[in-house]
């Protein structure tokens, strides 16, 4: 059913700024930075954007997937030098955490709880704490990842689940390799054309994403062996690199965004336009086919908003590319040409810093829109999550 919120300029959320760190290889340039330090760097960077006044921030909401507890959002806010009165809220919906944090900020604005939020996500896989269960004898039993579904119903690792998707939906190795090659080629070309320059905050000696590879060829892709299941089709070449990174957006009200635009806040995109939040949907699905969760959440979003397949085909579409198999299966389920997704390449090339990835999708949508997309264009962010879930969010690049 449609959102029950009454849309007024004071309760309509708008993303007015978005910044991210370059994604870094695990164990690479960010290996000595903890998650809150990466998030703090992104927060500090966005404070230089017009309309992002530290004294006006209602809350900081940050998604994170592999942290050790505590409240990374509050710690990051303090580390970034925000006023002590600004609180912080940490969100864990695994790979969808960063997008969920942004949606939550938008929902709070719709509810009239505040008029300026910083929201996004962060992941430091390099410094993620070791985790263990304590047995009855007090001994520690260390584990690599959390459990996401009952073991009796199946709780596959992400790579095994990608193989399940490829098999279940008939996604061939060739299609996966071809799509991964395209993602890298698009990301390399986008970097060459400066498409990432205004969204990236140089940090830790990096000024560009480490993941995109200009030297990949079909012949090289074909040499990668199956990575997760013997004889399978999912390889290191058509899977994303796991990465460290952070992304933060500023969400305010339409009324405040209009005032800022009238005052000449050019960072709002030159013309008076912004990413206006329309709605979002989260759904669950079979945990053994977790990679297609975004297909289900997008269908739910379409039912809530009246979005049609035709409108999706004419939208800006960003979908987290954890594995090529899941991108292709999701596109097939939504009757979309996969070439419509991730115009400048996606996580297969840029990397997948779990909790930050959903926020990176929104950052990419804003950056692309500001390069000349017509006002009124729909913008959709989609991500599938561990445990068999999907989250999709609908924005519109529109007149303020």
Image (cartoon, grey):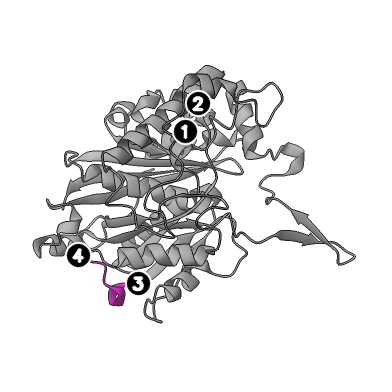
Q: Position of residue 379 (x, y in %)?
A: 30, 41
> Mark 4, residues whose alpha carbon is within 10 Å: few (<14), some, or many (≥20)?
some
Q: Is label 4 in contact with label 2 (beta carbons under 8 Å)?
A: no
Q: Residue at x 47, y 54 (%)?
A: 245
Residue of label 2? 329
User: Upstream in the sequence, badge 3 or badge 2?
Assistant: 3
| Gap between marks 1 and 3 measured at Cα | 33 Å
Span of residues in magenta:
50-57
Q: Is residue 142 left or right of residue 10?
A: right
Residue of label 1? 295
> Mark 2, residues whose alpha carbon is within 10 Å: few (<14), some, or many (≥20)?
many
Residue 282 appears in the rendering: yes
| Gap between marks 3 and 2 measured at Cα | 40 Å
Residue of label 4? 256
Principal SS element in the magenta part?
loop
Judged from this view, the residue extending furthest toward the right is 137
Residue 171 appears in the rendering: no
Q: Position of residue 251 (x, y in %)?
A: 30, 60
| SS for dot 1 | helix
| Gap between marks 4 and 1 measured at Cα | 34 Å
Choose mark 4 or mark 2, whichever is in front.
Answer: 2
| Gap between marks 3 and 4 measured at Cα | 14 Å
Residue of label 3? 58
Q: Is label 2 in contact with label 1 (beta carbons under 8 Å)?
A: yes
Q: Is residue 182 left or right of residue 250?
A: right
Q: What is the quadrant of residue 168 in the picture? A: top right
> Mark 1, residues whose alpha carbon is within 10 Å: few (<14), some, or many (≥20)?
many
């Amino acid at each position: 059913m449609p959102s029950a919120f009454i849309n007024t300029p004071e309760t309509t959320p708008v993303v007015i700024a978005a910044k991210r760190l370059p994604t870094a290889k695990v164990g690479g340039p960010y290996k000595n930075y903890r998650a809150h330090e990466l998030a703090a760097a992104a927060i500090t960077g966005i404070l230089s954007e017009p309309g992002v006044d530290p004294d006006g921030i209602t809350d900081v909401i940050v998604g994170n997937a592999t942290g050790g507890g505590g409240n990374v959002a509050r710690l990051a806010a303090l580390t970034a030098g925000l006023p002590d009165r600004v609180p912080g809220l940490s969100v864990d919906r695994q790979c969808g955490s960063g997008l969920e944090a942004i949606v939550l900020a938008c929902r709070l604005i719709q509810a009239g709880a505040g008029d300026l939020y910083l929201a996004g996500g962060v992941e430091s896989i390099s410094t993620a704490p070791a985790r263990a269960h304590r047995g009855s004898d007090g001994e520690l039993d260390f584990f690599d990842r959390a459990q996401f579904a009952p073991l009796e119903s199946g709780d596959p690792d992400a790579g095994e689940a990608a193989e399940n998707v490829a098999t279940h939906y008939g996604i061939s190795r060739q299609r996966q390799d071809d799509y991964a090659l395209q993602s890298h080629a698009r990301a390399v070309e986008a970097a060459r054309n400066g498409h990432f320059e205004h969204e990236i905050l140089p940090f830790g000696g990096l000024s560009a994403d480490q993941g995109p590879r200009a030297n990949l060829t079909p012949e090289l892709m074909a040499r990668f062996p199956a990575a997760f299941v013997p004889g399978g089709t999912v390889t290191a070449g058509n899977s994303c690199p796991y990465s460290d990174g952070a992304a933060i957006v500023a969400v305010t009200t339409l009324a405040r965004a209009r005032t800022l635009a009238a005052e000449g806040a050019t960072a709002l995109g030159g013309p008076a336009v912004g990413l206006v939040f329309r709605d979002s949907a989260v759904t669950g699905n079979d945990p053994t086919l977790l990679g297609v969760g975004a297909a289900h959440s997008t269908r739910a979003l379409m039912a809530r908003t009246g979005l049609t397949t035709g409108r999706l085909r004419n939208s800006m579409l960003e979908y987290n590319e954890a594995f090529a198999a899941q991108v292709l299966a999701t596109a097939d389920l939504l009757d979309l040409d996969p070439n419509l997704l991730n115009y400048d390449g996606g996580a297969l090339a840029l990397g997948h810093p779990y909790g930050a990835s959903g926020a990176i999708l929104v950052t990419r949508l804003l950056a692309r829109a500001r390069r000349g997309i017509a006002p009124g264009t729909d913008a959709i962010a989609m991500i599938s999550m561990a445990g068999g879930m999907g989250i999709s969010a609908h924005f519109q690049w529109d007149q303020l």
